[in-house]
Amino acid sequence: MKKEIVILIALILLGCQSLSSEKEQKVSFIQLREKMVTEQIEARGVKDKRVLAVMRRVERHRFVPQEYQRLAYRDSPLPIGEDQTISQPYIVGLMTELLRLSGDEMVLEIGTGSGYQAAILAELAKEVYTIEILEPLAKSAKIRLKDLGYKNIKVKCGDGYLGWEEFAPFDGIIVTCAPPYIPKPLIEQLAEGGRMVIPVGEYYQELKLLTKRKGKIQEQSIIPVRFVPMIHNERRGNPVNKEIKLPSPKVKGTISVEETISKRRSRREYKDEPLSLKEVGQLLWAASGITAKWGGRAAPSAGATYPIETYLLVGRVEKLDSGLYHYLPSSHSLIKVMEGSRPVDGMGGDLRRQLASAALGQGMIREAPITIVLAAVFQRTTGRYGKRGIRYVNMEIGHIGENIYLQAEAMDLATVAVGAFNDAAVKKLLRLKEEVLYLMPVGRQ
Ligand SMILES: Cc1cc2nc3c(=O)[nH]c(=O)nc-3n(C[C@H](O)[C@H](O)[C@H](O)COP(=O)(O)O)c2cc1C
């Protein structure tokens, strides 16, 4: 009997102790949240009072796995399983502020993750529709958000690239994973006057704000960011967005570096023959291919900022339609960004002819089966190095150009680095936002 009473008292004491430590924990989370908002979010310039208030209120630690709860209010993203992350608090604050929500909006979120961003949005907008492609995450986020009492959030497991047509148009769209391009269905599902916040790019990404006015999209770059890539298996229905995997590059050749250097010349005449997909893949790899596990590339780059984007203008390549393609180093693939035949200013439809004309009539561009277009995003490097970054980018184009020269020579191909062209005309023709620095036509010797 005595023994039972002792056990009972011990249990009551233990219960009280855990209750009080729970209370302490709660108080400490409130303090951490306050510090997070003041020091990480407000201090960096987020001003929207409603956003700041909601971020002070929503319990971020409930959206991370148990073992990371202590770190939930730190100034960093955290793993949430399935190789996915919950974004850094500041990025959540910034992206939410950019949507300028007043309370009546229908918002679409792509990339639910653990549901934290959806919870923040739900307190600031009327309805939130959120899509997650990974089923385990979609399921657990749905349960978590329901348990927390959110009634204005709909979670769906599906391909975010395609948006959620049934409930479109949306006043706000927020994408928390990075596609290489802005998905067309999302642009279509944005309401007139609506705002979309989306990270775009591969290894280097930029957070963009898109606004729709009179059916037209205005785009603004906000800051460089790093998000997990958007998973999208089927690029249905839009041939311009189709991703084409390139054959794996060879890393052993039959000719020495010394021989290649001594043979290399600028060559402006090419045989009237197409190139193979393998040859094209090899050249692009030599230009900007990934050669190190951490993302390092074939040519050196100041602070590994990789400011040069590689495009490919195709005239005659086996298994590739003519047109302009963007090379994606991380997947060693191409994405078509423009058809090859498009009448411009009464000059007929051939993009090669039009590019040759923009390059002051240099005829080899018209004749070459391909032209590699190297274009720079200066901000990636000046963002780190200030004005000196301009010098670095101009140096880097040389490294990439030389790699293309040597790789072409090693495959008995011919190329020339073309720097003389009308900048504005080339940019306009290829609809590029980057600054084009080199055009390198390549053909067979
Ligand atoms: C920055 C730069 C710009 C160039 N621009 C052109 C050009 O617009 N058209 C052209 O035919 N060659 C161009 N070239 C190639 C040079 O004419 C060529 O490298 C030079 O004549 C030396 O010949 P080599 O490359 O065969 O050694 C350019 C080269 C460099 C480095």
Image: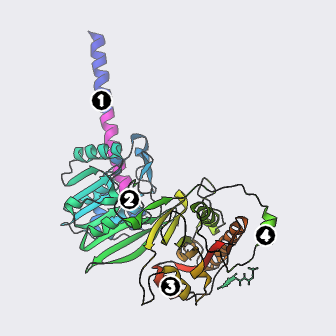
- Horizontally, residue 411 falls left or right of residue 57, namely right
* Percent position of residue 258, x then y: 81, 65
Amino acid type at image mark 3: Gln
User: What residue span does the magenta drawing correspond to?
Assistant: 18-34
Distance of mark 3 from mark 4, alpha carbons?
A: 32 Å
**Residue placed at 34% from the left, 67% from the top?**
184
Question: For the residue labelled by badge 2, is the local secondary structure a helix, a strand or a loop?
Answer: loop
Distance of mark 3 from mark 1, alpha carbons?
A: 79 Å
* Percent position of residue 385, x then y: 60, 74
**Residue placed at 77% from the left, 67% from the top?**
260
Residue 137 shows in this picture: yes
Snapshot quadrant of residue 346:
bottom left
Q: Quadrant of ligand 1?
A: bottom right
User: Dominant secondary structure of the magenta stretch?
Assistant: helix
Q: Is residue 112 above or below residue 267?
A: above
Question: For the residue labelled by badge 1, is the local secondary structure a helix, a strand or a loop?
Answer: helix
For disc 1, the marked residue is 15
**Residue placed at 46% from the left, 56% from the top?**
76
Amino acid type at image mark 1: Gly
* Percent position of residue 133, x then y: 35, 50
Badge 3 local density, few (<14 within 10 Å), some, or many (20+)?
Answer: many
Frontmost of labels 2 and 1 is 2
Residue pushed farthest front?
272
Distance of mark 1 from mark 4, alpha carbons?
A: 78 Å
Frontmost of labels 3 and 1 is 3
Badge 2 local density, few (<14 within 10 Å), some, or many (20+)?
Answer: some
Q: Which quadrant holds the C terminus?
A: bottom right
For disc 2, the marked residue is 235
Snapshot quadrant of residue 343:
bottom left
